[in-house]
Image (tube, coloured by chain):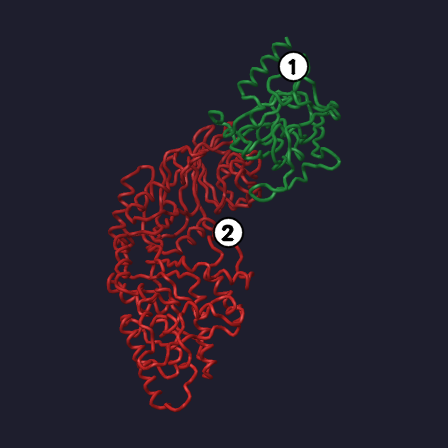
C-alpha cells in the first residue's frame, strides 16, 4: 500500500505517524511518560510538535522526520547530529550479523536514536518510535546534514529498525495512519488560530 | 556335496544340530558357489545329511576300536535347555548321539533358522518372489533394470556372531585348527538366490547402479530385545539420535560387536542362539525411481506473476506462479511424487523476462515414467506453451543432475541485460542523459535493499554496470538499457534505495528518479543447449 503515482524509493512503503506529545519538546533530562505512546493527543498552543514518520515495508521500518517537525521548517539550520546518545552507547557502533541481525542494539519506542542541535540553540531528540533491533543509522546525514532537510523521507532518513516478526503487526498500533495524522494537523491549526 | 571337505564336517554337524539352516551352514563353510545356494532347501538339507552320513560311515570303519572322539560322546539335549546352561567357557555344544545315519535331527528341516531367522529359507522361495513382483508391477513404474535393497534386523549380526563363536569353541574342543573368519555375508548369499528369480519375473536384470530401487524391510519383533545387552557392554556405541526410533541400528550393533570381547559376549548371549518360533516379517516392499531432471528456458510475459507460489498465513496472495505453470504438466506426464524447481536467478513479480528466456531445471522426484523421446519432449513443451500466455518455455530437454550446478553458476557469474522505464521529477532534455551511454564498468556499492532486508543479512555488495544505452522519451521519461554483473539490484540502482545504493540514476542525473517498468532482456548463459525447432 504505497502512494499512487511516481515518487521514489519510498513509494512501496506505508506511512505511519507518531506525533509529538503535549508535554512539549524533549530536551536533555526531560523524560517522556508512557502517555506518549498513545495516539491522538492534544497540542499545547504555540509549541510546534516534534512529529516522526515511520515508513514500513513488510517487516522493515525506516524512521524519518515528519514534515511538521521543527527541524524541517524554513529558517532552521542544523548545527550538529550526534549518534552518541549516552556515555556507553553510540548508535554508530551498532553491528549486526546474519539474517536475524544478531548483535543489534535493541530499541524500545522511547529509545533515542540521535540528538540534533540547530544553530538557534535548540536541541531535539529523535526517538525510535518502534520496538525492535536497530539495523543501521544513516551516516550520510553526518557528512551532509542538509540531506535531512532536503529529502527527509528518503535520503535524509534517520535509521532502519527491524521489529520482531511476531510483533510486526502490533507495532503500528501505537501509531497513526496518514489520515488520522492529517486530522491531528487540522486540530492543531484549529487550536492555533 | 563336493564343495564341502573333511574340515567342514564338525561345523556342519554342530550347526545342523543346533538349528541352523542349510544355506547358513554353507555360508559358515565359506562355500562360494552361487549356484549351490539356489538349490531348493529340501535338496540342500538332504545333501548335508548325506555328507555327514558318508563321513561318519568312513570314520566308523576306520576307528572302531579307538576311543570315540568327544563329539560322538556328548548326548543330545533339548536345545532350549542347553542354551540356558551356560558356563563361563561358553556353552558346550550339544550334539546328537553318534548312531549311524542319524547325523541330523529331522525336525530342523521345518524350523526357522536360528541365524538368518528364515531369510535364507522362506524368503528365497517363489512365493515371496511373486509377492515382490506383484508389488512392483502394480506400482506401474517404467524401468530397465533394478536394484534390490534389503534391510535386515540388527539382531541377525548378533546371532551370527553367537553361532560363529560356537563353531570356534567346538573346533577348539576338538583340537582342530580354527576356521577362517571370512564367512559368506548373509545379504550377499540372499542376493545370489533372489536376484535371478526377480530378474526372471520382472524381465530385466539386477544392476547395482540402477535408478529403480525395490526395497524390503525385514523385522523380527520376537527377538528385538536381543541387542539390548550390547548397550550395557558398549554404551558409547549407542547414542540416541533424533528422529531415530531405535538406538539399535545395524551400524551401531555392528560397531559394538567389533568392540565387545568374546568372553563378555558369551556371558550375555546364548551360544548357540536359540531357535525362534517365528519367521521374520517382510514389513514393507517399496519401489522408488531415481530423480529425473528436465531443463529449459522460460519467458515471463506477465507483470503479475511470482516465480514461486506466494502464500502468506496460508492465504495465496497471487494466483499461480512460474514454477507451477511449468511443472504442472511435467508432474502429470512423468507421474512424479514431487518436484524441485531451480533457475539461474529470478525476477520480481512485476518484471518480464524477454529474449531467450531464463534457464531453469526441474528435479522430478520418484517419477513413474522416465523415458521420453525428443518428439515427446517437444510435444510436452507445446502443451505447456498452449496452456498459458503468461509464460512460454523453450529448449525443454532431459538432462543430468549436473544441471543444478549449471543453474547456480549462471546465477552467480553470468551477465544479464535489462530495459528500464525511468521517471524523473525534474525535467530532462536529451543532452542530460546522453552521457550515460559513455559510462563503462560503473562501480556500484549496494547495501542490502530495504525491500529484502527482513530476510537477508545486512551487507554491502560491489557490482558493475558494464554498459548503458539511453532512449529519450519525454521531459520526465526515458528508457535505459543496461548490461550488468550477476546479482545487481536494478530497481535500487534507479531510485537509489534511500541513498543506500551509490551511485544511482538519481545521483548521476542530480534528480529524483523512479523505475516504472523493468524487463529482463537476456540472461547470458549458454545452457541448456539450444534445440533445433
Q: Name the foreground residue: B243 vs A89.
A: B243
Horizontal relation, residue B518 to residue B325: left or right? right
User: Which residue is rendered at x = 45% and y = 69% of the image?
Assistant: B83
User: Which residue is rendered at x = 35% and y = 91% of the image?
Assistant: B62
Q: Disc number at residue A43?
A: 1
Q: Disc number at residue B242?
A: 2
- State how far apart marks 1 and 2 are (Cα): 61 Å
Where disc 2 sits, the SS reads loop
Residue B95 at x, y = what percent?
40, 76
Instruction: Tell me the quarter of the image containing the N terminus of chain B.
Output: bottom left
Residue A129 at x, y = what percent?
62, 27
Q: Nearer the viewer, mark 1 or mark 2?
A: 2
* Chain at tag 2: B
Where disc 1 sits, the SS reads loop
* Mark 2 surroundings: few (<14), some (14-19) or many (≥20) residues within 10 A: few
Are discs 1 and 2 located on one and the same chain? no
Hue used for the chain lettered B: red
User: Which residue is rendered at x = 34% and y = 58% of the image?
Assistant: B282
Q: Disc number at residue B504?
A: none
Hue used for the chain lettered A: green
Q: Name the foreground residue: B145 vs B485.
A: B145
User: Which residue is rendered at x = 68% and y = 22% of the image?
Assistant: A33
* Chain at tag 1: A
Q: Measured along the vertical axis of the image, is residue B470 above or below residue B342?
A: above
Residue A79 at x, y = what percent?
72, 28
Task: Decide if residue B29 is in sight here.
Answer: no
Q: Measured along the vertical axis of the image, is residue B207 above or below residue A24?
A: below
Amino acid at each position: 500500500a504505497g502512494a499512487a503515482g511516481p515518487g521514489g524509493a519510498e513509494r512501496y512503503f506505508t506511512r505511519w505517524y507518531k506525533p509529538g506529545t503535549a508535554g512539549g519538546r524533549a530536551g536533555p533530562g526531560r523524560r517522556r511518560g508512557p502517555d506518549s505512546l498513545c495516539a491522538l493527543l492534544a497540542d499545547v498552543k504555540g509549541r510546534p510538535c516534534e512529529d516522526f514518520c515511520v515508513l514500513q515495508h513488510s517487516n522493515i521500518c525506516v524512521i524519518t522526520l515528519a514534515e511538521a517537525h521543527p527541524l524541517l521548517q524554513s529558517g532552521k539550520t542544523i548545527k550538529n547530529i550526534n549518534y552518541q546518545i549516552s556515555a556507553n552507547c553510540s548508535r554508530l557502533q551498532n553491528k549486526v550479523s546474519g539474517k536475524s541481525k544478531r548483535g543489534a542494539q535493541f530499541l524500545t519506542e522511547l529509545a533515542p536514536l540521535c540528538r540534533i542541535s540547530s544553530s538557534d540553540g535548540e536541541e531535539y531528540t529523535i526517538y525510535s518510535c518502534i520496538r525492535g533491533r536497530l539495523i543501521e543509522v544513516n551516516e550520510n546525514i553526518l557528512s551532509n546534514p542538509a540531506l535531512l532537510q532536503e529529502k527527509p523521507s528518503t535520503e535524509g532518513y534517520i535509521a532502519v529498525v527491524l521489529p520482531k516478526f511476531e510483533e510486526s503487526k502490533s507495532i503500528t498500533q501505537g501509531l497513526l495512519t496518514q489520515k488520522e495524522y492529517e486530522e491531528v494537523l487540522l486540530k492543531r491549526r484549529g487550536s492555533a488560530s | 556335496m563336493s564343495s564341502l571337505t573333511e574340515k567342514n564336517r564338525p561345523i556342519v554337524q554342530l550347526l545342523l544340530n543346533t538349528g541352523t539352516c542349510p544355506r547358513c551352514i554353507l555360508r559358515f563353510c565359506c562355500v562360494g558357489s552361487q549356484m549351490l545356494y539356489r538349490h531348493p532347501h529340501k535338496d540342500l538339507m538332504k545333501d548335508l545329511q548325506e555328507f555327514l552320513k558318508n563321513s561318519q560311515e568312513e570314520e566308523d570303519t576306520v576307528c572302531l576300536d579307538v576311543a570315540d572322539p568327544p563329539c560322538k560322546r556328548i548326548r543330545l539335549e533339548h536345545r532350549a535347555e542347553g542354551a540356558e546352561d551356560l558356563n563361563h567357557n561358553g556353552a558346550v555344544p550339544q550334539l546328537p548321539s553318534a548312531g549311524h545315519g542319524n547325523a541330523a535331527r529331522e525336525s530342523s528341516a521345518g524350523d526357522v533358522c536360528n541365524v538368518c531367522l528364515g531369510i535364507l529359507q522362506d524368503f528365497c522361495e517363489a512365493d515371496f518372489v511373486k509377492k515382490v513382483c506383484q508389488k512392483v508391477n502394480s506400482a506401474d513404474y517404467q524401468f530397465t533394470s533394478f536394484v534390490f535393497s534389503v534391510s535386515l534386523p540388527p539382531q541377525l549380526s548378533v546371532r551370527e556372531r553367537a553361532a560363529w563363536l560356537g563353531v570356534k569353541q567346538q573346533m577348539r574342543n576338538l583340537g582342530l585348527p580354527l576356521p577362517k573368519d571370512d564367512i559368506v555375508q548373509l545379504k550377499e548369499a540372499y542376493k545370489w538366490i533372489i536376484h535371478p528369480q526377480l530378474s526372471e519375473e520382472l524381465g530385466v536384470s539386477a544392476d547395482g547402479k540402477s535408478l529403480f530401487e525395490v526395497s524390503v524391510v525385514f523385522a523380527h519383533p520376537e527377538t528385538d530385545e536381543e541387542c539390548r545387552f550390547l548397550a550395557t557392554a558398549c554404551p558409547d556405541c549407542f547414542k540416541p539420535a533424533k528422529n531415530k526410533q531405535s538406538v539399535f541400528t545395524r551400524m551401531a550393533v555392528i560397531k559394538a560387536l567389533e568392540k565387545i570381547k568374546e568372553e563378555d559376549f558369551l556371558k550375555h548371549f546364548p551360544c548357540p542362539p536359540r531357535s525362534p518360533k517365528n519367521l521374520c516379517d517382510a514389513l514393507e516392499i517399496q519401489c522408488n525411481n531415481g530423480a529425473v531432471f528436465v531443463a529449459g528456458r522460460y519467458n515471463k510475459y506477465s507483470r503479475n506473476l511470482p516465480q514461486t507460489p506466494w502464500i502468506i498465513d496460508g492465504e495465496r496472495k497471487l494466483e499461480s506462479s512460474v514454477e507451477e505453470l511449468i511443472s504442472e504438466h511435467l508432474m502429470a506426464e512423468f507421474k512424479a511424487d514431487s518436484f524441485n524447481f531451480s533457475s539461474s536467478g529470478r525476477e520480481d513479480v512485476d518484471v518480464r523476462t524477454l529474449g531467450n528466456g531464463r534457464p531453469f531445471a526441474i528435479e522430478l522426484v520418484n517419477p513413474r515414467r522416465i523415458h521420453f523421446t525428443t518428439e515427446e519432449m517437444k510435444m510436452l513443451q507445446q502443451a505447456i506453451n498452449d496452456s498459458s500466455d503468461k509464460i512460454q518455455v523453450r529448449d525443454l530437454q532431459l538432462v543430468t543432475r549436473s544441471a543444478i550446478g549449471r543453474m547456480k553458476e549462471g546465477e552467480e557469474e553470468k551477465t544479464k541485460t535489462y530495459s528500464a522505464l525511468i521517471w524523473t521529477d525534474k525535467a530532462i532534455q536529451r543532452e542530460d542523459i546522453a552521457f550515460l551511454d559513455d559510462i563503462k564498468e560503473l562501480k556500484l556499492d549496494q547495501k542490502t535493499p530495504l525491500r529484502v532486508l527482513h530476510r537477508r543479512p545486512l551487507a554491502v555488495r560491489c557490482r558493475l554496470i558494464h554498459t548503458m544505452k539511453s532512449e529519450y522519451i519525454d521531459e520526465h521519461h526515458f528508457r535505459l538499457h543496461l548490461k550488468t554483473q550477476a546479482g545487481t539490484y536494478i530497481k535500487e540502482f534507479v531510485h537509489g534505495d534511500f541513498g543506500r545504493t551509490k551511485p544511482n540514476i538519481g545521483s548521476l542525473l542530480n534528480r529524483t528518479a523512479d523505475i516504472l517498468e523493468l524487463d529482463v532482456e537476456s540472461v547470458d548463459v549458454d545452457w541448456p543447449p539450444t534445440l533445433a525447432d
